[in-house]
Image (cartoon, grey):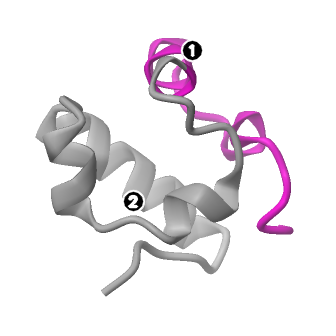
Amino acid sequence: MELSESINKLELYSSVVKELKAKNILKVGQLCKMRKRELSKLGLSPATIEQIEIKLQLQGLDFKR
């Protein structure tokens, strides 16, 4: 998966995609550059962050460490 691809390619729940788009996170690369703590500060729930992390890992990607 390319980092420049839309977050839609991660096959997240539509509610999660809407939440990310509302926060102006539109590309997979933007997610990979973030830390879990940053997403939490943006108001995403731990369950949502976990779902995003799993979908990223299935594509061989991860959050910034």
Queried whether the magenta region covers residue 37, the answer comes back as no
Q: Secondary structure at mark 1?
A: helix
Image quadrant in which the C terminus is located = bottom left
Q: Residue at image x 74%, y 33%?
A: 8
Residue 47 % position (x, y): 19, 37
Asked if residue 27 is positioned above or below residue 12 in the image, the reply reads: below
Image quadrant in which the N terminus is located = bottom right
Q: Reading the chain from its start, which is encountered first: label 2 or label 1?
A: 1
Relative placement, left or right, of 6 versus 54 is right
Residues tagged 2 and 1 counted as in contact (Cβ below 8 A): no
Residue with the mark numbered 2: 53
Residue 55 % position (x, y): 53, 54
Residue with the mark numbered 1: 14
Q: Residue at image x 66%, y 36%?
A: 11
Magenta-colored span: 1-21
Relative placement, left or right, of 30 versus 8 is left
Q: Residue at image x 56%, y 30%?
A: 24
Relative placement, left or right, of 35 versus 25 is left
Residue 9 % position (x, y): 78, 43
Relative placement, left or right, of 51 versus 29 is left
**Label 1 crowding class (10 Å Cα cut-off): few <14, some 14-19, many 20+?**
few
